[in-house]
Amino acid sequence: MECSVRENNGRSIVVVQGDMDNEHAVSIFRETMLALLKSGKRDVVIDMSKVESINSHGIGKLLLFYKKFKEAGGEIKISSLEGHTKEVFETLMLDRLFKIE
C-alpha cells in the first residue's frame, strides 16, 4: 500500500493506493496521518478511489484518526468510495459518520 499527500486550496488530499486489509498496509496510512496531524493540518480528504479492499484493520485506523482530528478541531472527509469499499462503508454506516465527497 502507498499513501501520497497533495495540497489543494488549503486541504490535504491523502491518496491511498492499495488494500487497507492488513497491519503492514495500514501502518503506512497511520504514519501519513500522524505526520499531517503533527504538522498542524486539520482539513483532510482521504481519496479512496484506488482502494479495492478494506477490513477491520483499515476501518480501525480511519476511526482512530477521525477521533484524533476531531479532538484537534479538524475534520476528515472521504472521497471516491467505490465497489467493495463503498459497500463496507454503507454496511457499517460509516457513510453517516464521515462526510463523503
Image (tube, helix red, strand yellow):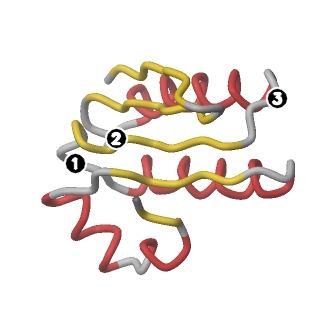
The mark lying in front, picked from 3 and 2, is 3
Instruction: Say which amino acid is labelled 1.
Output: Ser
**Rendered position, 17 above or below 67:** above
| Mark 3 crowd level (few <14, some 14–19, many ≥20, 10 Å Cα) | few
Pinpoint residue 90: horizontal percent, then vertical percent: 31, 77
Distance Cα–Cα, label 3 vs label 2: 25 Å
Nearest the camera: 23 or 4?
4
Pinpoint residue 65: horizontal percent, then vertical percent: 65, 48
Pinpoint residue 9: horizontal percent, then vertical percent: 59, 32
Residue 20 circle label: 2
Pinpoint residue 19: horizontal percent, then vertical percent: 26, 37
The structure residue drawn at horizontal position 65% and vertical position 32%, both measured from the top left corner, is: 10
Residue placed farthest to the front in the image? 9
Say what secondary structure mark 1 lies in. loop
Question: Does the residue at mark 2 contact the one at mark 1 (Cβ under 8 Å)?
Answer: yes
Pointer 1 residue: 53
The mark lying in front, picked from 1 and 3, is 3
| Mark 1 crowd level (few <14, some 14–19, many ≥20, 10 Å Cα) | some
**Rendered position, 101 above or below 33:** below
Instruction: Say which amino acid is labelled 2.
Output: Met
